[in-house]
Amino acid sequence: MDLDVFVAAHQPEWHRLETLSRRRRLTGEEADELVTLYQRATAHLAQVQSAAPDPTLEGRLTTLVARARSAVTGSRQASWRDVSRYYTVSFPAALYRSRRWWLPIAVISVLASALIAWWIAAHPEVRDTLATPDHLRELTRPGGEYETYYTDRPASSFAAQVWTNNAWVAAQCLIFGVLLGIPVLWVLLTNILNLGVGLGLMASAGRLDLFLGLLLPHGLLELTAVFVAAGLGLRLGWTVISPGPRLRRTALAEEGRATIGMAVGLATTLFVSGILEAFVTPSPLPTWARITIGAVAETLFLLYALLLGRHAAAQGEHGDVPESDREDLQPVAA
């Protein structure tokens, strides 16, 4: 095939297709012409790729076809309705559907942290392996590092730092799920150890009540978000191993979209916990009032996940993107 002759023969219709693709409004006749020219340009691209590959011409036609396809199919604009649907349907449905993963993880993690805390508090030789006696006293004394952690920085910058750090931990759990969930276990173990060590050291110093008064106002919601992220990551990893009746690539695509889609909701949850940690935890409110605020936030989240989520799941919602936004799948024999 002579490319010069081919280009000269079809240049006018390519130019016409480019012109129509850039117009915001088309008449009925122009719309029909656009579809026809788009189909012809697609055939031209395939012809060039098979008969006379030329990178320059292929790149030009690929760009032209992509732009024309957007004009033919229309581009979908995100709206506030999508945001509302996400927070009232998709996110709670995904939370509810994954409850059999993150609820057991939460229970196991809390029990493991409590066991580590008891072990550290009851065995001085274990504490001695963690740090020097001077460092341990600096951590646990009145006005020590555990206590001043929440007050030694401006509340706004502290909230931003806490939110960024926690959001990154949650994102790691979601992303690492595709690696069979194995890295998620390490992230979860690190979280359990940090919590258990803090509880154990403060208990050994007789200041466990102070530590819980500082932890619970924000920690209930924060830890729950981390447990949810870990549960989702492990569920995604299990999907790779056992996709069920679906093709593995189909199952991974569906569960992967739902899992990654949870990142926005979890980031919002961690933003709330970051606000509590920066403004409620170090506040002069009585301990009972601060813990009550944290308990109310945790209760609202659980009601949101288990009640609103159950209702959304009962309507057939899976937490995936709307069906209209998914790519078409070619039917295959099981």
Image: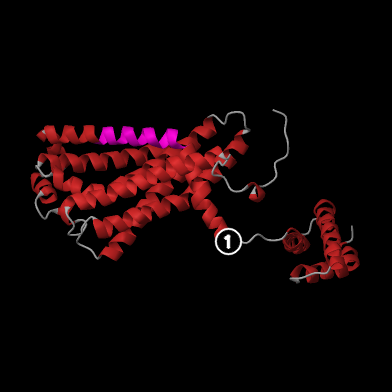
Q: Amino acid at mark 1?
A: Ser
| The magenta stretch spans residue 303 | no
| The magenta stretch spans residue 110 | yes
Q: Mostly what secondary structure, the magenta segment?
A: helix
Pick whichever, 80 or 241, lies toward us. 80
Disc 1 marks which residue? 79
Residue 254 lies in what quarter of the image? top right
Q: Is residue 10 above or below residue 185?
A: below
Pick whichever, 154 or 248, lies toward us. 154
Residue beneath the point at 43% across and 43% down: 305
Residue 17 lies in what quarter of the image? bottom right
Q: How has the structure been colored for display?
A: secondary structure
Q: Position of residue 94 (x, y in %)?
A: 50, 42
Q: Position of residue 169 (x, y in %)?
A: 38, 48
Badge 1: few (under 14), some or many (20 or more) residues near its Cα, within 10 Å?
A: few
Q: Is residue 241 above or below residue 62?
A: above
Residue beneath the point at 81% across and 56% down: 42
Q: Is residue 154 above or below residue 302?
A: below
Give the magenta-colored segment's residue range.
98-113
Q: Position of residue 92 (x, y in %)?
A: 48, 45
Q: Is residue 187 left or right of residue 151?
A: right
Which quarter shows the C terminus?
top right
Q: Position of residue 1 (x, y in %)?
A: 89, 57
Residue beneath the point at 27% across and 52% down: 293
Query: Does residue 86 appear in this view?
Result: yes
Give SS at disc 1.
loop
